[in-house]
């Protein structure tokens, strides 16, 4: 490992020195923003026509590009904005900020461009998808509520765990393998109402980017994907309000300047109110959610910006006052951007993230509280060394505080004894360096390495076991059982219980075949030190996060991907084809009959194995015209193997490979948007997926007069195919109105042909006929909805 690391550093140093001693050039740098609000734009393009060089803005709207002295035509472009051109004379370093205007407004001396999502041929970045808030808002949604996470399901390689299920799966990975960030803060549960809605308010979102592979070294801690979401900063020029009134929920967002062109605020809230109708019908049950998004931004000076952003959300479920469930996220992030020079940009972040789960069972007098908190310090730098060489480097440290469960009796007559499952603590520091380099006119590479560490900390008392085996195997019954502890060991506060470290190299390459097409390849290794303890394919609020230790090892991933990218007919159409292969070490699975809730020794029901997934993804986009949209298709397989640890042990599924609960062989999505007139536009989504892998009984026997089912191999069967068609129509009464009150009506139908997709299938014996039967549970049929959106 040491020799391999030295090899990486030697190669990196040679490339670095070659770039440093390149000829001296001048730097054009600055920010790109929305001219109407001064909101910085992420991923805006800066193109220099004379030398055919390009740069893009970072997460804070900053760009930097180095050029020889001369006169240049600079072209600035961004989706939904008019392309702007300006002549720059470069005889010294130039700092210039650009303001773009919406392409819906009439402008002079600018080139009007439509919504383009062309493939970036030169950039080595691959396995990445970006959606704008405008695209998301055009999609038909369930119950009239715009849903960020549901929009991800239209992308290749992304599937859901079933209708009404929370979370999402990427390239055959589990939901807990997705790192979900909101303004850099970790979101541990991304859903409201057990998966019906996401926690993200589309009105507050500026940019959304999903990394499925080729993940940059600045990200770590998860295996399958990174969903990076940034909130808007708030309008620095004018006061505005945006909102919507729907059938079961409403939202309202306010933004404006605190000091014009210098400081701004944003505050937005959502709430559902369907439970109020239940109360009117004398129904004691209720289920609702609410959340709040906030952000303050302040331009301290020419080189410094300060941001304070937060999110708070809660879900409440109450059944006849006997069952009460409260859960949700709370995050806070203080960020400071500093520009050391025209070539060196830094971001410092202090982040707090908290996920809480509370449960009250009035009929037995029990109150249960659990959750996870983390405290994160991040320091990231982006160094624009030359026009052909860029560096990203930095560090971050995360301290975790886990509460597996606090049990409290409710009332003096409760028979429940108070108890506290031992709290767990962990520390995860990491450092990284990432480079992007143009080697030749046709070859661009990105390479880097992340070094991560993880320390499981006390105070805690842990069991010890014979031969360090927390699970034993009964050779006679051929079953796994909990091992009996041989004793305990106590660790003091801050004492290291277990520690791990991993080098995580990343590399990608793009080879430009011509101006319209390229091939790319990537490799990345990732380490995940946190585990979601769940035996369902879809996460639930009751699931518990646990850190790695001597019994639960970190998961390690190696992913390879190759792809072909092409733009057609002057970028009007794009085609992206990728193939991937992933292999994972230390993948957890559970012994049969595992009890996960309030388990003080979770290691007694866990076994470690390996996993693999592989597939082909195709994305075809139409970027221009009245009809725009995309077709995505994925052919993939996701499998797991948990063999026996010693001769004679059967392992799980007799040690053979078996499909994971998120294996989807086929995944097709067709998304379209049609602008009929200035007043009317239409949207549609058709989704089709292979049914979820499941384990069905294949026979039965009688014991004591009771029918006992005999199950087949693990996940050897499949639920019925999942598909539905959604449509929407948007009516804007006064499309020409750009000031004052602006409103639109959105009419949508979810599941147009009333497909009853199976959320689950259970088996039972019919009381009348005595025959076995399968019962399908469906959540959604056809759902029409109407929403009124407004802004002023």
Image: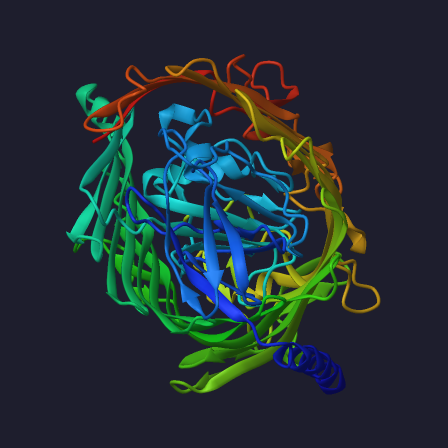
Is residue 719 or residue 110 the one in the foreground? 110
The answer to which image quadrant residue 348 occupies is bottom left
Residue 714: percent from the left, percent from the top?
A: 72, 44
When the figure is inspected, residue 611 is found, relative to residue 746, above or below; the finding is: below
Residue 121: percent from the left, percent from the top?
A: 68, 48
User: As drawn, is 746 to the left or to the right of 588?
Assistant: left
Q: Assign the N terminus to one quadrant of the image.
A: bottom right
- Count up the numbered dots: 0
Which residue: 59% across, 70% down?
434
Residue 581: percent from the left, percent from the top?
A: 75, 53
Task: Please identify the residue farthest to the right as the structure is shown.
Answer: 647
Which residue: 41% across, 18% down?
748
Residue 563: percent from the left, percent from the top?
A: 75, 48
Residue 341 visible, this angle = yes
Is residue 129 or residue 68 the one in the foreground? 68
The answer to which image quadrant residue 34 occupies is top left
Which residue: 46% across, 16% down?
782
User: As drawn, is 12 to the left or to the right of 84?
Assistant: right
Residue 750 visible, this angle = no
Is residue 567 or residue 707 the one in the foreground? 567
């Amino acid at each position: 490992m040491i020799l391999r690391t030295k090899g990486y550093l030697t190669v990196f140093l040679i490339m670095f020195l070659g770039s440093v001693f390149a000829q001296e050039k001048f730097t054009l740098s600055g920010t790109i923003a929305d001219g109407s609000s001064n909101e910085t734009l992420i991923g805006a393009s800066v193109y220099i026509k004379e030398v055919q060089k390009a740069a893009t803005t970072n997460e804070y709207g900053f760009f930097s590009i180095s050029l020889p002295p001369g006169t240049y035509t600079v072209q600035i472009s961004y989706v939904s904005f008019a392309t702007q051109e300006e002549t720059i004379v470069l005889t010294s370093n130039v700092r210039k900020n650009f303001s773009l205007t919406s392409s819906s407004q009439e402008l002079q001396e600018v080139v009007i461009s439509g919504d383009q999502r062309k493939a970036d041929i030169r950039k080595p970045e691959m396995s990445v998808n970006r959606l704008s808030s405008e695209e998301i808002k055009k999609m038909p949604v369930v119950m009239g509520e715009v849903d960020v996470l549901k929009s991800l399901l239209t992308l290749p390689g992304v599937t859901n765990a079933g209708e009404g299920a929370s979370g999402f799966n990427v390239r055959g990975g589990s939901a807990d393998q997705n790192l979900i960030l909101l303004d850099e803060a970790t979101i541990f549960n991304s859903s409201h109402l057990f998966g019906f809605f996401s926690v993200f308010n589309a009105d507050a979102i500026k940019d959304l980017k999903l990394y499925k592979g080729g993940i940059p070294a600045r990200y770590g801690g998860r295996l399958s994907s990174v969903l990076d979401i940034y909130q808007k900063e708030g309008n620095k020029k004018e006061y505005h309000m945006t909102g919507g009134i729907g059938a079961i929920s409403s939202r309202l967002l306010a933004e404006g300047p605190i000091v014009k062109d210098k400081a701004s605020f944003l505050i937005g809230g959502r709430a559902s109110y369907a439970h109020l109708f239940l109360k009117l019908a004398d129904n004691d049950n209720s289920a609702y959610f609410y959340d709040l998004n906030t952000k303050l931004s302040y331009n301290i000076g020419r080189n410094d910006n300060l941001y304070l952003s937060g999110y708070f959300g809660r879900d409440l479920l109450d059944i006849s006052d006997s069952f009460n469930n409260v859960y949700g996220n709370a995050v806070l992030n203080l960020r400071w951007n500093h520009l050391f020079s025209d070539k060196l940009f830094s971001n410092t972040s202090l982040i707090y993230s908290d996920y809480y789960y509370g449960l009250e069972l009035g009929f037995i007098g029990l109150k249960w509280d659990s959750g996870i908190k983390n405290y994160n310090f991040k320091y990231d730098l982006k160094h624009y060394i030359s026009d052909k060489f860029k560096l990203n480097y930095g560090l971050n440290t995360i301290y975790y505080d886990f509460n597996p469960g606090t049990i409290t009796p409710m009332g003096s007559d409760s028979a429940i004894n108070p108890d506290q499952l031992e709290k767990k603590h962990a520390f995860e520091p990491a450092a990284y360096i990432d480079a992007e380099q143009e080697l030749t006119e046709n070859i661009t590479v990105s390479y880097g390495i992340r070094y991560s560490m993880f320390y499981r900390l006390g105070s805690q008392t842990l069991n010890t076991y014979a031969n360090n085996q927390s699970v034993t195997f009964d050779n006679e019954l051929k079953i796994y059982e909990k091992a009996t502890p041989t004793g305990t060991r106590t660790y003091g506060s801050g004492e290291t219980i277990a520690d791990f470290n991993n080098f995580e190299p990343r590399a990608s390459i793009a080879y430009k075949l011509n101006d319209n097409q390229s091939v790319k390849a990537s490799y990345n290794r990732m380490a995940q030190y946190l585990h979601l303890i769940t035996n369902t394919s879809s996460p639930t609020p009751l699931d518990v996060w646990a850190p790695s230790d001597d019994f639960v090892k970190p998961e390690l991933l190696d992913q390879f991907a190759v792809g072909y990218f092409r733009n057609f007919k002057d970028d009007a159409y794009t085609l992206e084809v990728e193939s991937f292969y992933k292999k994972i070490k230390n993948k957890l699975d559970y012994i049969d009959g595992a009890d996960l809730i309030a388990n003080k020794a979770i290691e007694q029901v866990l076994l470690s194995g390996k996993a693999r997934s592989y597939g082909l993804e195709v994305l075809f986009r139409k970027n221009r015209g009245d009809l725009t949209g995309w077709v995505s298709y994925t052919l993939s397989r996701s499998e797991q193997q948990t063999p026996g640890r010693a001769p004679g042990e059967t392992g799980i599924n007799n040690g053979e490979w078996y499909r994971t609960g998120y294996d989807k062989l086929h995944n097709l999505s067709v998304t379209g948007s049609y602008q009929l007139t200035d007043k009317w536009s239409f949207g549609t989504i058709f989704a089709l997926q292979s049914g979820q892998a499941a384990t069905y009984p294949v026979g039965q026997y009688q014991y004591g007069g009771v029918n006992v089912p005999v199950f087949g191999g693990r996940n050897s069967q499949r639920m019925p195919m999942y598909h539905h068609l959604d449509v929407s129509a948007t009516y804007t009464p006064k499309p020409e109105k750009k000031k004052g009150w602006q409103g639109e009506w959105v009419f949508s139908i979810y599941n147009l042909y009333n497909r009853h997709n199976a959320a689950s299938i259970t088996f039972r014996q019919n009381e009348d006929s005595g025959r076995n039967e399968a019962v399908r549970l469906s959540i959604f049929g056809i759902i029409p909805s109407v929403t009124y959106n407004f802004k002023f």
